[in-house]
Image: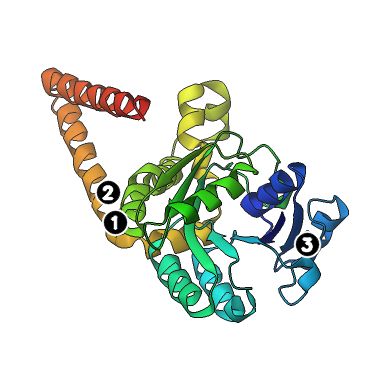
Amino acid sequence: MKVGIVGLGLIGGSLARAFRKSGCAVYGCDRDKKTEDFALLDQSIAGTLDLSDPASRPEVILIAITPRSAEEWLQENAAAIAPGTLVIDCCGIKRDICATGFALAAEYGFDFLGGHPMAGLQFGGYKNSRADLFANALFVLVPPRDDICLLERARNALRLAGFKRFAVMTAAEHDLAIAFTSQMAHLVSNAYIKSDHASAAAVTAVTGGAFRDMTRVAYLDETMWTELFLANRDNLLPEIDGLLYELGRYREAIAAHDQEALWNLLREGKERKKELEGHAGKN
């Protein structure tokens, strides 16, 4: 199978490596020519993605760049995508890119699905990409319609990159869920590390797993996450407000030395975690 990868950062580079490892002919492109050259040098890609070249025309294209850039790439290249080509984006939010992708696909005859690979690292860039990043990972699919054949075609292609689990939802459902499960985690981690007491000496002396878990994603790509947060602000702001309210309850209990109130708050949080883990375990 011929696969095209747009963007060779952590996600795109890992997709290229994974598909290449599975025996696919992979063609990629990146706005940074040096990154593209390096991917060619270490044979993650067989050549540069050129939609006008019949010899390297891909059957599947994955777009692994920021949402705004992905929309621009689709608008600029839709007419050159061969009819019947399967195109899947890998953006962290879905509503805008899906609206653009669905409309262009209907106009030019290719098949577009929104997508989100639920795997990653705190460090980005091609240099951190790896062929096993998506081993047994979940991939969210956002189809334009209820089309079992289209979904199965996408699953079959993505399995070649290591994905084993798939969730199907609407773009609105995805963006609502991701505000809590991903965006809040990155935002809170990034804010938490700004403590006046977050000195190198303190971190070296008295840190354990909790600190490492809490701060792992504070190291983020500020350009990409600024775009993601602002584009999904209607879902993210209520989550921020909810967290501020809950933190206020904890603060009040601690300030008042109210042992019972604090115990109840901590118990509520633990029970909520158990509830969510139990639900996740059934799926």
Q: Residue 31: percent from the left, percent from the top?
A: 70, 69
Alpha carbon of mark 2 to alpha carbon of mark 1: how far? 7 Å
| Residue at the image position 50 percent from the left and 58 percent from the top | 91
Q: Amino acid at mark 3?
A: Glu
Q: Is residue 84 above or below residue 241?
A: below
| Residue at the image position 28 percent from the left and 49 percent from the top | 240
Q: Amino acid at mark 1?
A: Asn
Residue 273, by quadrant, is: top left
Q: In which quadrant of the rendered image does the N terminus lie?
A: bottom right
At numbered mark 3, what does the secondary structure look like: helix, strand or loop?
A: helix
From the image, tell me which residue sits under label 3: 36
Q: Is residue 281 above or below residue 23?
A: above
Q: Nearer the viewer, mark 2 or mark 1?
A: 1
From the image, tell me which residue sits under label 2: 239
Q: Nearer the viewer, mark 3 or mark 2?
A: 3
The dot on residue 235 is: 1
